[in-house]
Each structure stands twice: as structure tokens, then as C-alpha cells.
Image (spheres, rainbow, N blue to C red):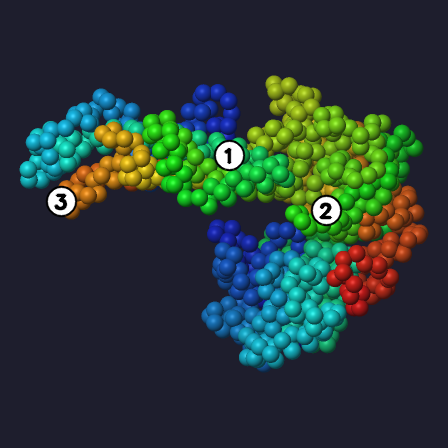
Amino acid sequence: MTAPILTVSDLRVSFGRHEAVKGVSFSVPAGRTLALVGESGSGKSVTALSILRLVEREGGRIDGGAINLFGENPVELTAIDEAQMRAIRGNRISMVFQEPMTSLNPVLTVGDQVSEVFIRHRGLGVREALAEAKVALDAVRIPEAGRRLGQYPHELSGGLRQRVMIAIALACRPQLMIADEPSTALDVTTQAEILALMRELQAQIGMAMLFITHDMGVVAEIADRVAVMRHGELVEDAEVSAFFAAPRHDYSRRLLAAAPKLGEGSPTAPPASEPVLEVEGLITRFRLGGGFLRAARHFEAVRGVSLTVGAGETLGLVGESGCGKSTLARSVLRLVEPSAGAIRLAGRDLSAMDRTTLLHARRDAQMVFQDPYASLNPRLPVSELVTEPAAIHGVVTRRHSRELAVSLLEKVGLEADAVDRYPHQFSGGQRQRLCIARALSVKPKLIVADEPVSALDVSIARQITDLLLELQRQEGLSFLFISHDIAVIERVSHRIAVMYQGEIVETGPAAAVLFSPQHAYTRRLLSAVPRADHRSRAAPPPAPRTVRIADFAGADAA
Amino acid sequence: MADAAFDPLASARPGASGRVAGARAMWREANAIQKAAFVVAVLLLAAAALAPLIAPHDPVAQTLIARLRPPVGFERFKEGHLLGTDELGRDVLSRVLWGLRLTLALAFAGAIIGLLLGGVLGLLSGMAGGVTDDLVMGAVDAQIAIPFTLVALLILAVFGSSLQVMVIVLGLYGWEQYARIVRGEVRKLMRMPFVEAAVAAGASRPRIAFRHLLPNIVSPLVVQFTLSLSNIVLQESTLSFLGMGVQPPTATLGSMVGIGRDYMPTAPWIVIFPALAILLLTFAVQILGDWLRDRADVRLRSR
């Protein structure tokens, strides 16, 4: 192991009375990558923020420990004042955040934001700084760097924005780059490109990386060493090969086991049966702009989709962000009005129904959403939340709704005494269970689940998918299960449909789609998935990519 | 932790005992300022309600030989006029009590009318969108663009300044603020997954409006209500000052301040006491409003 560039020893951080980090020690070897792994609330982000001394801004307090940055000017970061710290941030240590959407200032051009670093840390004039900024954008493989300088963040795709963030982080050739889930918000194919870029730039500059993630696949792709955190403590710190071969700590083993892995097999298909949902030639258009004296343009989010879901069957719909899968889900239930096409739900023609009939028909199909924090009305107690659909459809009287609520909670594995609580008193996984209980309250034939586990930690996500499978076995439910994560899709689906640019490009039994993909896009999607096995590291094969949004055009150059 | 967190839920359960327990918990958790504001509010309400009983004099009876007498403790104080007399020899205490009564009634009636009008229009505008939204927001823009005092004067000039007209005029004051707030919040909430979840479950529009939207916009509404209550008191005094408000000799707090202004250098008590009443009133309303807003939010309650 090479000499460390950063050592953290016995770091303790608290928020009020809550101890977020309880005596954590690790070191980042120079020029190499340490992955800090853990589930939400494990204290990994707090640790990262403490290194940059940004944790005070969030209301935290460093109670003890030392953070030593080595190199030409060794310095103990917890001992210096704010002014000295400012000279280190962005210069010797830089950071890339998770959300490329919000970590760039929306009202400043890309050029302004990249050149700011050169003006601040290298004392360059505006003109030289802009020239340097162009070089920096070139270095992260942003096509047409000169033109990008004058663009605003919203004009760039998510992948390009993250490249800009990396360009800013690398501008001063830092000794250490801290990356807090930098690829989590990106599509898998974009993520693969960004990870490859980071590895390459790291080798060029010779910097160290502290890479924070919850995704074991990403760890396998990028890390040299792995440190696992749980409840504010470091439970394991090992070389990446040793870690994947034989994780020492029990929690590490569980984390690895819970991580979705491609190729674990799908549930066996139910016998062929009457379709619950049939969709034919569905088209959904959105109006873009337009208005008084201005012609509107239209954007086709869903382009002639046909699919069926049989009774007791799960159809997994996989696709990247912006491919139209959420719009498709909403169009199927007519939450978004489709422009054309036929929808038959439980033998009834949904597409031709008037408003009142539609309200009644919605009983047969319920929906579970992605964000369990936002999809429960914060002002209602659980007893009313989970029984609301039943109350709407007159399935339950007011008097019996409490009993119904209790039995629903039992079904989804929650305690009966939860009925009097409010949503904010539950964790993310528990809230998603509440959402499922709500959907079950009217005994629907079909549940449309839009990314139901994407906002959850892997171990929680696994419990939720297990719950869905169990409920399907017991009640014969059908699912239209939407996800961007093909490993999750594999775990729950009998059949898989792959969506790309508003169309379904491939559909078939799960095993067929996964093991002998026919369409080029499906193959590309499968190869971009990071595997939780560090030996399979490989650059994603460049695939032809017809592009929907203008800004994506150049992203392939990488 | 768990037990403490659930205690306030007693108030959410039906039954009188639950409500009493909830009120008791609310009082126990209040801080000193909130308690003070509550006491002040109760005293002001009692004073206003009991004005006919406790006012020592007829508020409009003039005693010209006892003009401009100061309050108790000063030279030339006249027995029986605790807070002194005004320029026509009327008892200031009695006028403050009667004025408080009228001002409170006007302010509450006006603020509630504004709340209902603006709330309904804002809800309609935010939920329906399209042409409805354009029309309502057009009316809001118009209301903001035209100085309200001008509109009020026009209405009062045409219909005369009876008490009923006055209530309606003050009700029109500030409706556009409610409409804008409600519309903005509704538009934001309509995009929230939990509203979408209700739609997906088959909920009708009224159900969404009353069960999912309104409870979530209580906080900004309460804040706006307390602000507009104070504004209405001031607006009423402006109109009285311009001679278009409640007609003399009827006392309102606003008109007393307006008229008393001329005597400020020589007889400041004519202004000070009604102004003090306005101050206490708005202060109590604002504090109570914040308190209610926090209590209404279940997320803050269990802390």
C-alpha cells in the first residue's frame, strides 16, 4: 500500500444529541480510490462533509478526532480556521455531489462556473480563466466545449452536467477528490461512461479519490479499497479483491447479498391466463410551449406501445430516464390522457370511458409510486391513508375502516399500532409498505408500480420486492413493474419489456430478454450494468445511439 | 419517545374528552409569549363583547365643558373619565371599548370574506388551470394594479357607507393575496405524488380539494389571515380618515386614531389608547396565528 494522502483518525461528529459518526478511522492511499460504502443514515456522507469541514453548515459538529492531509504542505484539517479551509476546498480537495441538477447554479453559465475556480484559486484574469475552462471541459470529454461555456445548466443533459461538475472538481488538479454518489442519479449507460472517465482522469492527474456509494456494482467498478460504514461506525476496511472474495464482517456479507445482481433468475411464470391489461397502439403526446399567437410543438413521449399483462403475472418495464416509461404507466390508468390507442382493463374498455365511469374503474388498478416520502398525504393518519381507496369506492364503512386498516398493515408486515401514526413517523421502507397497503385496500386486479424501490436502500428494496412477490402468490395480483434497474426487474418479472425512446423495442419472457437480447439497445443496457464483482471490469462497448435530446448527441464521444 | 409522540394524537380522536385533553396539552406546551398573547386576546374579546355593560359612559355623549381632559394621574383629570376625554368631551375609555367592538367585528368579517372568496377562487384557479386560471389571475392582477383605496372610495360613494357596505368593501380587501397563495400552493401540491395517488385511487375532485389540498395549505393561509386582519384594521382607519368609513360619531379604533392625530401635540391620549388597542390586537393575532399554524402541522406536533 502506498503512503496515504489523507488519514482520518477517530473522527466523531454529532448533530445535536445525535451521534452521526462514532470514532471512524481510515486512510486514503495516494493516487488510489477508497470506496466508502453504507446505507442511508450510516454516516458516510457526514464523514465526507467533515473532511471538507462543510458539516458545520448542515448543523453538525466535529467533536473529536483528526483529519490529516499530507503532500507538500501537511495540514490537520480540524485545527485550521475557515479562511485556511477555503484555500484548501476546491484546490487541494474537491468534491462532486450526487445531484448534477442542483449542484450547478441555474442562473450562471457553465463558463462562469468553471472559470470561477481558476479565478479564485489561481488568480487568473477572466479571459485566461475562460480559456482554461475550455481546456477543462475538453479534458472531461464534453463535446463542443467552446459552445458549452455560454450555455446554462438546464441546456445540458444529466450526464453532461456531471461532467461539468467533475471538470470543476479537477480544475486545480486536487490531491483528493471526494465524490458523493456521483453516478447515482444517472442512467446506467451514462453512469458507465462517467465511471470510466473518472478512472481515466485519476490515472492522468494521479489524485486520490474518496468515492461514496451504496451500490456494490459501482464499488467493484471503481474502488481499490473498500470501507463499510454502519450506524456511524466503520465495520470493515479491506482491499477490494479481498472484500468481494471474502467479506469479513457479517454486515458486509449481508450488504453484498442484498445487492441486486443480474443473473439471479426470475420467478417462474404462472400458467397462461386471461389478460388483465391489454394496451394497443398507445400514443401520448405532450404540448410543448405554444400559447397566444404561438404555435405549440408536440412531443411524443409514448409512441404506439402495445403490451399485455396476464392474471397473476408481472410484466417488468425497463428503460432509462426520459424513455417514457412513467408516462406510459400513467397513460395506462389515464392519469395522463393518451392521444390514441386502446386500453382494456379487466375486460373493460378504459380508453372510451367518461369521467364518472373511469373513477369507478380505477378500483381495478392501483398504483405505487417511487417516492414514499411524497406519496403519502402528511396530514392524514395511517388509518385513513391506507383505507382511502376503499372509502372512495364504498368498499368499507366508516365504522369498519379501522379494522380494515389493521388487517392491511398486517398484510404488508407492519405493526397494528401503527394505525394512529402519521407518515413522518415512518422510515422510507415502512412508508412504501403503507403505499402498498393502500393499493391493496380495494383488492385490485392490477398494481402499477412506478420505480417502487428506487428510493430505498438495497436491503430494504429487497424486502419490498419480496413482499410484492409474496402478495402476488397469495392474492393472484398482476403487476406492471417499472424500473430503470434491470437487476430489480429480473428479480420480480415473468416477462420483460424494454422501452427506448417512447417505444417498446423488445419484449418476451424474462430469461429470453436477459440471456439472448435481440435489440442492440437491450444489449447495451445489459452490458452497462455494473456487476458486484471486481474482476469483470471493462469499458462498456460503444453502441450506436440514436438520440432524442439534442444534448445527448455528443455524449458518445467519450 | 413513542408514548410522548402519540400523546397529542388524543386531540385527533373524536370525543369531547379527547378534545379537552388536546387543548390542555396545547396550553402545557405553549411558551410564555404564546400564553401572554392568548390572555391578551381573551381580554380584548371580552372587552369588545361586554362593551355595552362595562363602558362607563355613552361613547357618543358629548360634554363640551369637559373637553380634552387628560387620563387619571395627570393635572386637570376629571373624575369618572379614566382615560380622559376627547375634543368633544366624549369618554375615551368608552369609545375605545365600543370602537374595539366594531373594529373587531369589521376586521374578522372582512378577513373571513376575503379568505373565503380568495380561497375558493384560488382553489378553482389552481385545480382547473387553463381559461379559468387565466380569468382568475387576470382579476387578481387587476385588483393589484388598481389602488384599493380608490376602489373602496368608489364603492362607498355609490352605495353609501353603511356598515354592511363597509364589511363587503373590507372583505374585498386582500382577497387577491389569498387567491395567489392558494393557487400557488395548489399548483405545487397537484404535482405531488400523494395527490396523484389519490387520483389513481379514483378520488373525485372535491375529495382531492378538501382532503388532500386544503389541509396542506392551512399554514400559509393562517399566516395570511393574521396579516390581513391587521391590514384591514389599518385600511378601515384610512377610509375613516378620508371620511368615507364608518360615519361619526360612531367610534372605531381607526377613526379615533385618524381624528385624534390633529390633537397629538396637546392631547396625545386621544391617539395613544386606541392605537395601543390596535397594537395589542394585531400582536395577539399574529402570535396566536403562528401558534395555530405550528399546531395544525402534524409533523411539528410530535416534537
Q: Amino acid at mark 1?
A: Gly
Describe the element under mark 3 as helix, strand or loop: loop
Q: Count residues near mark 2 (Cα–Cα under 10 Å), then give few for <14, some for 14-19, many for 20+.
A: few
State the residue at coordinates (20%, 40%). Answer: B260
Q: Quadrant of residue A353?
A: top right
Q: Position of residue A281 (x, y in %)?
A: 86, 40
Left or right for B57, reference B128 = left
The chain identifier of the residue carrying mark 3 reads: B
The chain identifier of the residue carrying mark 1 reads: B
Of labels 2 and 1, the one closer to you = 2
Q: Count residues near mark 3 (Cα–Cα under 10 Å), then give few for <14, some for 14-19, many for 20+.
A: few
**Closer-to-camera residue (A545/A407):** A545
| Residue at far front of view | B158
Q: Position of residue A165 (x, y in %)?
A: 65, 66
State the residue at coordinates (84%, 35%). Answer: A342
**Which residue is tagged 2?**
A287
Q: Amino acid at mark 2?
A: Arg
Tell me if I can see residue A118 in this picture: yes
Q: CA distance from mark 2 to mark 3?
A: 69 Å
Q: Count residues near mark 1 (Cα–Cα under 10 Å), then give few for <14, some for 14-19, many for 20+.
A: many
Asked if the residues shown at circle 2 and circle 3 are in contact, with their CB atoms under 8 angstroms apart, the answer is no
Q: Quadrant of residue A433?
A: top right
**Looking at the rendered structure, which numbered label has been put on residue B266?**
3
Q: Amino acid at mark 3?
A: Thr
State the residue at coordinates (65%, 57%). Answer: A101
**Looking at the rendered structure, which numbered label has been put on residue B119?**
1
Q: CA distance from mark 2 to mark 1?
A: 29 Å
Describe the element under mark 2 as helix, strand or loop: strand
Q: CA distance from mark 3 to mark 1?
A: 46 Å
Which image quadrant: the C terminus of chain A? bottom right
Which image quadrant: the N terminus of chain A? bottom right
**Closer-to-camera residue (A186/B196):** B196
